[in-house]
Amino acid sequence: MKRNLVIASTLMVAMLAMPALGQIIPGDSTTYPSVGILNSPHNLNNYPGVTVPGNRVCMPCHTPHNASVSGELGALWNHAVTQETFTMYSSSAGQPEPPSKLCLSCHDGVTAIDNYGGVTSTGIVLTGSENLGTDLSDDHPIGIAYPTSNPSEFNDPTGFAPGIGGGPGVQLVAINGLDRVECTSCHQVHNNGLGSFLRVPIQESYLCLQCHNK
């Protein structure tokens, strides 16, 4: 009887020490769920009114040949690129750099989401919270250099924690010799396991505290 009580107590302690099923623990990337693009909003077949031929989920954004944006930062881009001029968070920031401009090619609320590969689109644009518009002055700044010279306010980027599956967490984008903050710094566009395509959890402000030393 006493032995059974000891075993039961040991099991209870072990269960209490284990995270609840499906619980996300900021800082423990083994608890981060993974949801690939097929079952995410970035599969445009999931968007009402849009049909991608052959369910080729990559095609609206990427092409293996004759991309519309050249170079590594162009990501073999197949979608129409936004032609809008954006109002930025800071007057010192320039217009969005290529990694952010690609995202805004749908999220500007102007460019049709199925305008890709030179085909005639339906004219469907994003609405609701996914539509950032052209006024980015009320959004987290992008197109800015990461202020590594201010360690009292901003963390050393070499210490950024890993993301889903132990892959890259928050990422700065090297452009013209500067590490910059862009849309892809916080968002992993191919995995929606954490919601909003975040690279690390928002719980406990974990995402914010990767950069901000508070």
Image (spheres, helix red, strand yellow):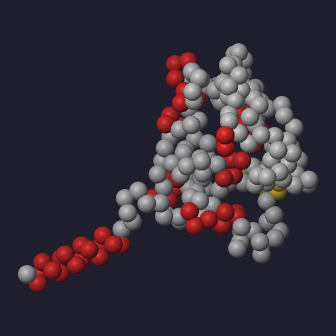
Give the farthest residue toward the right: 91
On the rendered image, what quadrant is the N terminus found in?
Answer: bottom left
**Residue 109 at what x, y percent from top left?**
74, 34
Q: Tally the numbered discs.
A: 0
Is 13 drawn above or below residue 83 in the view shown? below
Q: Would residue 151 appear left or right of 202 to someone viewing this image?
A: right
Q: Position of residue 84 (x, y in %)?
A: 84, 34
Query: Height in image: 186 above or below 108?
Result: below
Instruction: Tell me what residue is drawn at x 85 percent, y 49 percent.
Output: 88
- Given residues 97 and 131, the one toward you in this image is 131
Left or right: 34 as drawn, with respect to 138: left
Task: Note whether residue 211 is visible.
Answer: yes
Residue at the far front in the pictured view: 128
**Residue farthest toward the top in the current orientation of the protein:** 120
Q: Residue at x 91, y 53 (%)?
A: 91
Residue 87's x, y, as percent? 87, 45
- Residue 75 shows in the view: no
Q: State the image quarter where residue 2 is shown.
A: bottom left
Name the side, left or right, on which 23 lies relative to 195. Answer: left
- Picture coordinates of residue 71 (x, y %)? 76, 34
Task: Work out which quarter of the rendered image holds the C terminus and state it.
Answer: bottom right
Q: Nearer the viewer, residue 69 or 36?
A: 36
Check the image and report above or below for 17 versus 201. below
Q: Is residue 200 above or below residue 100?
A: below
